[in-house]
Image (spheres, rainbow, N blue to C red):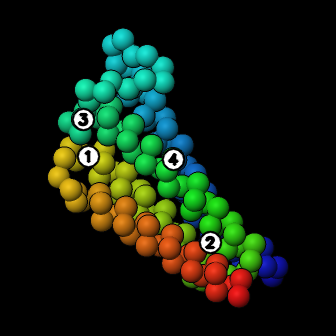
Amino acid sequence: MTSIDLYTASYWGIFVMLITWLIQSLVASVSKGSQPGAVPGKIDESLSHDSFVFRSHRTFMNSLENLPMMLGTAFLAILVGTNVFWTGVFIWVFAGARIVHMVLYYAIATETNPSPRSYFFLLGLLSHICLLVLCALALV
């Protein structure tokens, strides 16, 4: 088995992250575009958490803020040969946390902080930090 084959679980986790990101993009685009008078590239500033258009837009934007860093970290982890098991665990925890975060953001209209989705954001952030530490340990 080659070292590339060892990371198959990680590759699938990355694939799930990308599919989730694509779904978020489509949901945000369709929900916003279906509004009367929708203008491409602009979201109504008067919208808040009570609007699904706002929540779907924020879910996608939150992923735009978080996924590129995690994807870079995941690729670095694979390139530097981090522990295969823990790399897969941290990638899948992040992927799962992002999915639950997305579902909760779509389902719950709340201005409360922390909201239920906040805990899954933090779980994803923690898994990202752990993977970064794993990379640093592999580099020294």
Q: Is residue 43 left or right of residue 84?
A: left
Give the labeled residue for mark 2.
9
Pick the residue in front: 3 or 83. 83
- Amino acid on which disc 1 is placed: Ala
Give the CA distance from mark 3 to mark 2. Answer: 38 Å
- Residue at image position (75%, 72%) is 79
Give the labeled residue for mark 3.
48
First of labels 3, 2 by sequence position: 2
Q: Is residue 140 left or right of residue 88?
A: right
Give the labeled residue for mark 4.
64
Label 4 sits on a secondary structure element that is helix
Give the CA distance from mark 4 to mark 3. Answer: 19 Å
Using the rendered image of the protein, determine whether residue 133 is visible from the camera's viewpoint.
yes
In front: label 3 or label 2: 3
First of labels 4, 2 by sequence position: 2
Label 2 sits on a secondary structure element that is helix
- Residue at image position (17%, 52%) is 112
Label 1 sits on a secondary structure element that is helix
Residue 130: x, y in percent?
A: 51, 78
First of labels 1, 3 by sequence position: 3
